[in-house]
Amino acid sequence: MKKLKTVAAAVICAGAILLAGCASASNAENEASTAPEKPAEPAVKSNRPFGIEESEYANLMKLSLTSKGNNYRIKKVLEKLRAGEDVYIAALGGSVTEGAGPSDYRDGYAFQFNKKLKAKYTPDNGAHVYFNGAGLSGTPSTLGLVRYQSDVVDVLGGVPDILIVEFAVNDDGGDSTARAFEALIRNALVANPETVVIALYSAAQYGNTAAVKRPIAEFYKVPQVNVLDVVKYSVARKFFTEQLYYTDNVHPTKKGHEIQADALMNVFEVADADPADEEFAVPENWFKQKPLTNFTRILGDDANVKITKGSFNGADQTTQGLKKTGKGDFPQNWYHDSGNDSFKMEITCKALIFTYKEQGAWLSKKFGKAEVYVDGKLKATYDGGKQGGWCNCVPLYLIDEPELGKHTVEVKMKEGDEDKGFTILAMGYSR
């Protein structure tokens, strides 16, 4: 809000035109003076982030709501919140969802949103609301799909009532991440007919991939929030600068996170005020070609998977850590410390997402390169000790076929790297 400057009124003396003979002291007493103007009342400072005026902030919230989606499910969850029933909330995404930016990760948008939602819509300040912030730095949609069951459903003990999906600044905009984004949305909607899914597009100085995701989210009639539109508009009108909104080129400050939380709250406020929509049935067909149907995370052998660990029989204790626990994610992994025996897997699938770790350069154990073969042919060589690694995850498709088929996968250390480390962090497949 622009602070109004108090302008002191000058004392204006009447009788600016002096008549001859009226310069005496007695005449001066008769000169009329106007009283100074009363100083303007100081404007009330807005409590909104960056002191943005209420009317302007309301416009920003309207701008953030790319699509209302179908509000049938939101109306249902609002009923549960107001009745004090158990409600489960999860936010799945990358470092922005994890709370990166502020000094305390709990000032992240997902945590702020959880507090605001409980305060506004529950009779007991959310005593029966259960929240899981499932952000992990660097997570794109492909890794989010692999993580969903273990990091969201298993943690909550079931499918969430509200699921926020945030990958627009981590995805590359390609078809592979878009397909995983669709699978995440569809799986949650199908698993529970009352689950509310919100597509959240965070902001970054380099942009985001909202344009790729919009048609998918629209296909499933889920609400969409694009914070990048808000940031661009606000910077152009000097409500704040990029330096005030971001702590770097992507992670918001505490106030930036609050704007994002308020944009999510706006989804519920708009739906609450609008008439109820008819229930929307999840389409039988998929939006994208080669859909990732029946996606399952691999934790060991199952009816479609048989694994021989070889010398990848350890457990890496230095996997990428979670801010909320201080512990590594992916505790179940396949770690190679030394040896020549290959990791082998027989699998029946359409698609296989394979995730390996790039070792942190500061760690004493040196990681090397692994050769990966699919159906006896060299698919690629992956460098687990790549310069710049920070124990980050690298997800990719090893198999991606339109039809179900039997395949073999072999991972072995490149010649000369047998005594170096390599970690297969996680895998998931579609059938």
Image: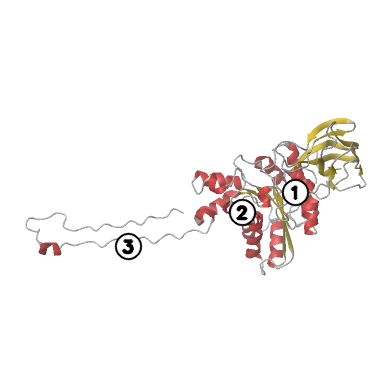
The answer to which of 353 and 315 lies nearer the viewer is 315
Please name the residue that numbered disc 3 is placed on.
Answer: 38
Determine the secondary structure under disc 1. Answer: helix
In the image, farthest residue toward the bottom = 124
**Residue 300 seen in render:** yes
Q: Which mark is residue 103?
A: 2
Could you tell which of marks 3 and 2 lies nearer the N-terminus?
Answer: 3
In the rendering, at what x and y percent does residue 152 appear? 77, 54
Determine the secondary structure under disc 2. Answer: loop
Question: Would you say the residues marked 3 and 2 are in contact, meaning their CB atoms lie under 8 Å apart?
Answer: no
Question: Would you say the residues marked 1 and 2 are in contact, meaning their CB atoms lie under 8 Å apart?
Answer: no
What residue type is disc 1 on?
Answer: Ile
Could you tell which of marks 3 and 1 lies nearer the N-terminus?
Answer: 3
| Quadrant showing the C terminus | top right
Q: Which mark is residue 185?
A: 1
Kindly report which numbered mark, 3 or 2, lies closer to the viewer in this rendering.
Answer: 2
**Image vertical order of residue 222 relative to residue 358, above or below:** below
Using the numbered discs, state the Cα–Cα distance from disc 3 to disc 2 in whole angstroms: 44 Å
What residue type is disc 2 on?
Answer: Ser
In the rendering, at what x and y percent does residue 54 appear? 51, 57
Using the numbered discs, state the Cα–Cα distance from disc 1 to disc 2 in whole angstroms: 31 Å
